Amino acid sequence: MASVWASFRDCGSVAYLILFLSTIGVVASVGAAVLVFTLKNRRFAIAVSAGVLVLGIIVAGAGAFGEASGRARTNEALGFMSGSSSIDPAMREQIRAEGYKESEQCVSLGLGGSALPSIVGLVLLTVALFMKKQEVAEK
């Protein structure tokens, strides 16, 4: 549990976005599973399961966004220190390596948060595609 908290802390403010989207993804996954298996409407099931899958992809994308923004902040901080003669190049590279390592934590949070919605979305989409088409009753 300590490593999850360290990842959350290292990722920064984007971790809250990932947590929010992951929570929505879990709730949407459960809701979509209930809807797909109770309503038995093929077209609706495909739409709902594709929506959950897209939400999983968005959570993973938020992790990638967090890494990119963390790297940009690291480079920006190093850019501000470029005029300083008190920081030698070895220290600058150590700061860059540590900043990049911390920003990579966003990817692991994003992938972890997107796992359930992505897997549930794929399973539900497979189930929906194999559902029988419902015949429309003619009057």
Image (cartoon, grey):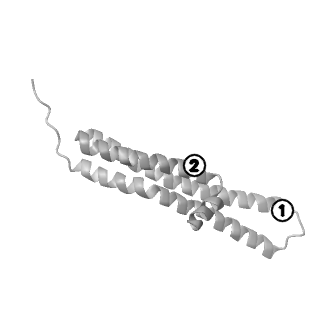
Within 10 Å of the Cα at label 2, are there few (<14), some (14-19), or many (20+) other Cα atoms? some
Residue ID for mark 1: 81
Query: As drawn, which residue projects farthest toward the top?
Result: 139
In this rendered view, identify the residue nearer to me: 1 or 30. Answer: 1
Across and down, in percent, residue 99 comes to: 69, 65
Per the rendering, the mark at residue 17 is 2
- Choose the circle earlier in sequence order: 2 or 1: 2
Compared with residue 20, is residue 3 higher up or lower down, i.e. above or below? below
Identify which amino acid the numbered label 2 is placed on: Leu
Element at badge 2?
A: helix
- Give the CA distance from mark 2 to mark 1: 29 Å
Compared with residue 26, is residue 1 higher up or lower down, i.e. above or below? below
- Which quadrant: the N terminus? bottom right
Across and down, in percent, residue 63 comes to: 55, 56
In this rendered view, identify the residue nearer to me: 126 or 8. Answer: 8
Identify which amino acid the numbered label 1 is placed on: Met
Residue at the spot x=9%, y=23% of the render? Answer: 139
